């Protein structure tokens, strides 16, 4: 499989490429999936990093990894190397299977004669397991979370919960699109509580892992241990509760844990991609519990916040991001923090690889694929058609002088999205909406932006439209 892109300094040697790839995958994948499919892999990497061979224990695992994870692994490798990478999967001789937490045993016979000269790469080390097994990422704190209007209310609520768990805002339900910082925020709550109360029982867990724990407890008849674990916590953090959809037994057990924790004044923090009443295939009684505390949204970061995030993340990487470059990137990468971080990694890697200082031109070169995709996919015309289809009106109504509410409202939403998702100026947008004055566009943009902060239904509709437009 061949993949391409740009990003990472391989000056430490090709052995570090696979370790860097593993580290990235560990951050992006549920823990159980990562430990089952990625951690056991060992790799051979060519000197230039343009070819990576993964040793897989058996044919079943090879087929599953090829189908489920090869594309993701390839994408990470391409980002790290900065040029096309050839990814191969091969059956590993028994002698080459890595021991847990150690180096890969020497391969008695090479995976393939063509790879005989490639250097051995150590298996990724086992993570350090904290005694209390809280599963928190200790780097994700309030101190490292950039604040802006997009997350100010959520951050304030989170800090209150961390300082006074079990009191107000219980449960705390944080929702928003992918990559907006929900996970960072909830990890910060757990880390702050443990800093204040080291003996507190805290657990961060992804909803998929909770589902897995329920299944295992039924299979092994270990429900006493399951209840002891979950019902005795001081703080339970569940990420992506939308994954509970259609899982009847899991929802039942989570409801029981929820009630037990509230009864003992423990705190529950949840994240989701939508607000509670927007969840589908979740029991009504559970949804009502989700909605019984405080529900707060995290929005896509505004321009100034995106600039601050880029500068802060660059500093954390030991690099300097000039403000003009940060503004250029922030104007072109609008959707979420994760994409901003990806763009930053590409720019820094491109700078290192080409031994050039970070500049707007370098950023333009590093992000040319991303910029061309955005320019091709998102246009005012595309926004008008998407919004018209969503609200079941005619595209022609976008340009017309008609002003009934069922037309004027979608038109304002389309103007707002045009301002947020394209590089068009207010006068240019007005011209594309039937020759309207720029003040009309400005009024629409401000009105929709303000209502988005307070009307959850509108916020959800905008989220759907944005994801549709970004493909």
Image (tube, rainbow, N blue to C red):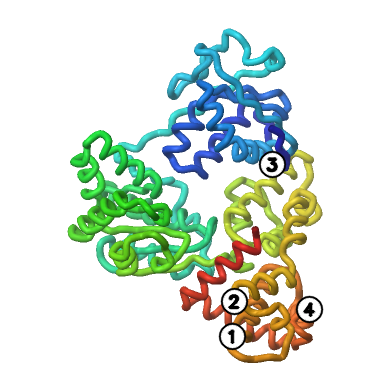
Residue annotated with mark 2: 391
Residue 46 is situated, as x and y percent measured from the top left of the image, at 70, 23
Q: Earlier in the sequence, mark 1 or mark 2?
A: 2
Q: Is 214 placed left or right of 79 in the picture?
A: left
Mark pair 1, 2: CA separation = 8 Å
Residue 301 is situated, as x and y percent measured from the top left of the image, at 57, 65
Q: Residue at x 50, y 55 (%)?
A: 144
Q: Earlier in the sequence, mark 1 or mark 4?
A: 1
Residue annotated with mark 1: 406
Mark pair 1, 4: CA separation = 24 Å
Q: Earlier in the sequence, mark 3 or mark 4?
A: 3
Query: Dot 1: what SS?
Result: helix
Mark pair 2, 3: CA separation = 41 Å
Q: Earlier in the sequence, mark 1 or mark 3?
A: 3
Q: Which mark is residue 7?
A: 3
* Label 3 neighbour load within 10 Å: few <14, some 14-19, many 20+: many
The answer to whether marks 3 and 4 mark residues whose Cβ atoms lie closer than 8 Å is: no
The answer to whether marks 1 and 3 mark residues whose Cβ atoms lie closer than 8 Å is: no
Residue in front for this viewpoint, 200 or 419: 419
Residue 242 is drawn in which quadrant? bottom left
Q: Nearer the viewer, mark 2 or mark 3?
A: 2
The answer to whether marks 1 and 2 mark residues whose Cβ atoms lie closer than 8 Å is: yes
Q: Quadrant of the N terminus?
A: top right
Q: Quadrant of the C terminus?
A: bottom right
Q: Residue at x 44, y 24 (%)?
A: 101
The answer to whether marks 1 and 4 mark residues whose Cβ atoms lie closer than 8 Å is: no
Residue annotated with mark 4: 428
Residue 104 is situated, as x and y percent measured from the top left of the image, at 52, 18
């Amino acid at each position: 499989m061949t993949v391409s892109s740009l990003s990472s300094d391989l000056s430490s040697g090709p052995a570090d490429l696979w370790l860097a790839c593993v580290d990235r995958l560990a951050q992006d994948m549920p823990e159980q999936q990562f430990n089952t499919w990625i951690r056991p892999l060992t790799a051979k990497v060519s000197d230039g990093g343009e070819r990576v061979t993964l040793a897989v224990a058996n044919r079943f695992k090879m087929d599953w990894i090829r189908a489920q994870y090869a594309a993701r692994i390839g994408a990470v490798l391409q980002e790290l190397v900065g040029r096309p990478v050839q990814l191969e999967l091969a059956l590993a001789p028994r002698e080459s299977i890595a021991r847990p937490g150690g180096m890969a045993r020497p391969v008695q016979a090479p995976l393939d004669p063509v790879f005989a000269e490639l250097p051995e790469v150590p298996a990724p080390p086992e993570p350090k397991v904290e005694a209390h097994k809280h599963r928190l990422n200790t780097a994700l704190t309030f101190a490292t979370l950039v604040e802006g209007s997009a997350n100010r209310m959520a951050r304030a609520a989170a800090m209150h919960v961390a300082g006074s768990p079990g009191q107000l805002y219980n449960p705390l339900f944080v929702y928003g699109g992918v990559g907006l910082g929900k996970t960072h925020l909830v990890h910060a709550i757990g880390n702050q509580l443990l800093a204040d109360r080291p003996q507190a029982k805290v657990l961060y867990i992804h909803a998929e892992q909770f589902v897995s724990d329920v299944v295992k407890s039924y299979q092994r008849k270990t429900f006493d241990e399951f209840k002891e674990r979950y019902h005795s916590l001081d703080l339970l953090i569940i990420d992506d509760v939308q994954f509970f959809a259609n899982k009847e037994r899991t929802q039942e057990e989570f409801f029981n844990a929820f009630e037990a924790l509230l009864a003992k004044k423990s705190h529950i923090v949840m994240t989701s991609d939508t607000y509670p009443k927007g969840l589908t295939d979740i029991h009504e009684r559970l949804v009502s519990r989700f909605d019984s505390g405080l529900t707060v949204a995290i929005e896509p970061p505004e321009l100034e916040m995106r600039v601050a995030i880029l500068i802060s993340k660059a500093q954390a990487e030991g690099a300097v991001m000039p403000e003009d470059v940060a503004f250029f990137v922030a104007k072109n990468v609008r959707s979420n923090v994760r994409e901003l971080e990806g763009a930053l990694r590409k720019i820094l890697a491109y700078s290192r690889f080409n031994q050039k200082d970070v500049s707007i031109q370098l950023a333009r070169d590093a992000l040319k694929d991303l910029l061309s995709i955005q320019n091709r996919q998102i246009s005012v015309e595309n926004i008008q058609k998407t919004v018209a289809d969503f609200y079941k009106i005619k595209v022609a109504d976008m340009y017309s002088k008609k002003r009934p509410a069922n037309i004027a409202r979608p038109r304002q939403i389309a103007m707002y999205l045009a301002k947020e998702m394209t590089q068009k100026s207010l006068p240019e947008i007005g011209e594309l909406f039937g020759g309207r004055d720029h003040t009309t566009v400005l009024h629409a943009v401000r009105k929709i932006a303000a209502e988005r902060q307070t009307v959850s239904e509108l916020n959800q509709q905008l989220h759907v439209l944005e994801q549709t437009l970004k493909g």
